[in-house]
Amino acid sequence: MLLTITTTHKPATDLGFLLHKHPDKFQSVNLSMGKAHIFYPESSQNKTTVALLLDIEPIDMVRGARHLSGKGFPLGQYVNDRPYVASSFMSVAISKAFSTAMNGKCKTKPELVETQIPLEAKISVLPAPQGGETLIRKMFEPLGYQVKLQQHILDTQFTDWGNSKYFTLELSQTIRLQELLSHLYVLIPALDNDKHYFISQSEIDKLLAKGQGWLVNHPLLEQITRRYLRNLQSLSKLALERLSEGEKIENLEAEENPEQKPRKETLHQKRLVLVLEQLKLSGAEKVIDLGCGEGKLLRMLLKEKQFTEIAGMDISYDELSKAKDRLHWEEMPPKQKERIKLFQGALTYKDKRLEGYDAAAMVEVIEHLDENRLPALERVVFELAQPKIIILTTPNREYNIMFENMKTASMRHTDHRFEWTRKEFESWAKGVAARNNYQVKFLPVGEVAEHIGAPAQMGIFTYGN
Ligand code: SAH
């Protein structure tokens, strides 16, 4: 993927001073997932262009990417568009290669930092999410750019396959270089639909720093923030609150992300109550909640004396610390504390800590794993941990048409890797049961609609015949 920035400011070679990169030199910086090369395809008094070329190493990317989706086929982690499209990698590269300029420094000609110069940026190629060209325009035009977009067709040999989601984007404006770089830094990842590479609390700080002075007034402020901090509702909420100086942001999920509506409390609450009922019925005393998230089920379990040992496991440290907060762990009386433990782990790696429980719950978890990881989960949970009873829930895809505003091809949650019909779920669950000496029965979760079933589905697995 390639970013070029051109100026016709006189003298155009000033671009080299601003970027702290000499036009005659070819330079490279190392990134955790490859290299970024910086060079000048043209440099003269009248016109100078700098190029930032990303050379992504797919193997490094897979190594470092816990979250990289396999996209439903085994080589998906290796064969994907990541090395070729502008994404958050580009932002990382911009901030590494042009850090001096981004920080608004220029030793040799400090006055240049504050000078608006004619700039043209060209990005090849940019993946556009749903909304395509309109969304790209809506992000850049309010910032004063002239936007030129060229959509690429899917395959030049098969033109009737139509257009791809990839665009070449050209932006032009007379503007300070630092501003242009900040806009690109924030908006490129905000346009990318795939998961980002690094997302952590510090991403908020970066967003706020780079968005200073322009993001708060942008008409798409909320959408950009949310897309930039993809999937992290709590982080985007925090960022929006900080951007609007502490003003509370309510109801973030419902309003912008229609797909998330169905996960509203009521259905989820119903689901948890059903799971709890089944756990109580089973007579289990030692229970583990696999993929416990922020610990909603754990709180319900704690209230029941029947459960003497309760454990919550999740892959996400953030979720676990939320669970700790919500359970008021710190203030818990010692006796309660002894009943419950929380730990980080992955359902796809064998783990002795998962053994010895009477029952396990997996509520809305499997669909967060790539389908090709399910055999690993099967081995870890059903073959090795082998609790007497496993209660598992997952959405029923057939029901999605009942949700208003939900696009046919989309899923209920941005992190879902798949959603199954009842038949698909039942066939998977029956296979798992047969291979691991479990019996399985199925229950609908939520109100059943004719022909399409309930919003979610539950499998209850019991060990032995
Ligand atoms: N069971 C909770 C949370 C559901 S969201 C509830 O019903 O409220 C799915 C959870 O699964 C998330 O917290 C996510 O961090 C966790 N998860 C995803 N993949 C996982 C894996 N491979 N191992 C363990 N937990 C995982």
Image: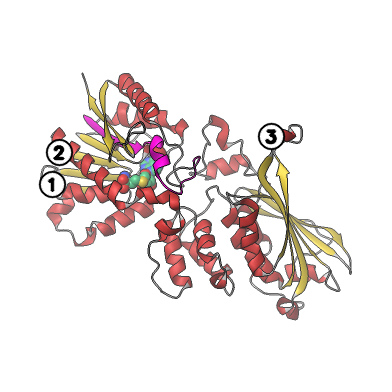
Q: In the rendered structure, which disc, 2 or 3, sits on the residue that comes first in sequence?
A: 3
Q: Position of residue 234 (x, y in %)?
A: 40, 59
Query: Ligand 1 quadrant?
Result: top left
Based on the displayed image, in which of its 4 quarters is residue 117 positioned?
Answer: bottom right
The CA span between labels 2 and 3 is 54 Å
Tell me which amino acid carries mark 3.
Trp
Residue 460 lies, with reference to residue 238, above or below; the image says: above
Neighbor class of circle 1 (other Cα within 10 Å; few <14, some 14-19, many 20+) is few
Based on the displayed image, in which of its 4 quarters is residue 419 positioned?
Answer: top left
The CA span between labels 1 and 2 is 9 Å
Task: Read off the residue under disc 2.
Answer: 280
Question: Pointers 1 and 2 in contact (CB under 8 A)?
Answer: yes
Q: Residue furthest front?
A: 450
Q: In the rendered structure, which disc, 3 or 1, sits on the residue that comes first in sequence?
A: 3
Q: In the rendered structure, which disc, 1 or 2, sits on the residue that comes first in sequence?
A: 2
Is residue 317 among the parts visible in the rendering?
yes
Question: Pointers 2 and 3 in contact (CB under 8 A)?
Answer: no
Residue 402 within the segment the image draws in magenta: yes
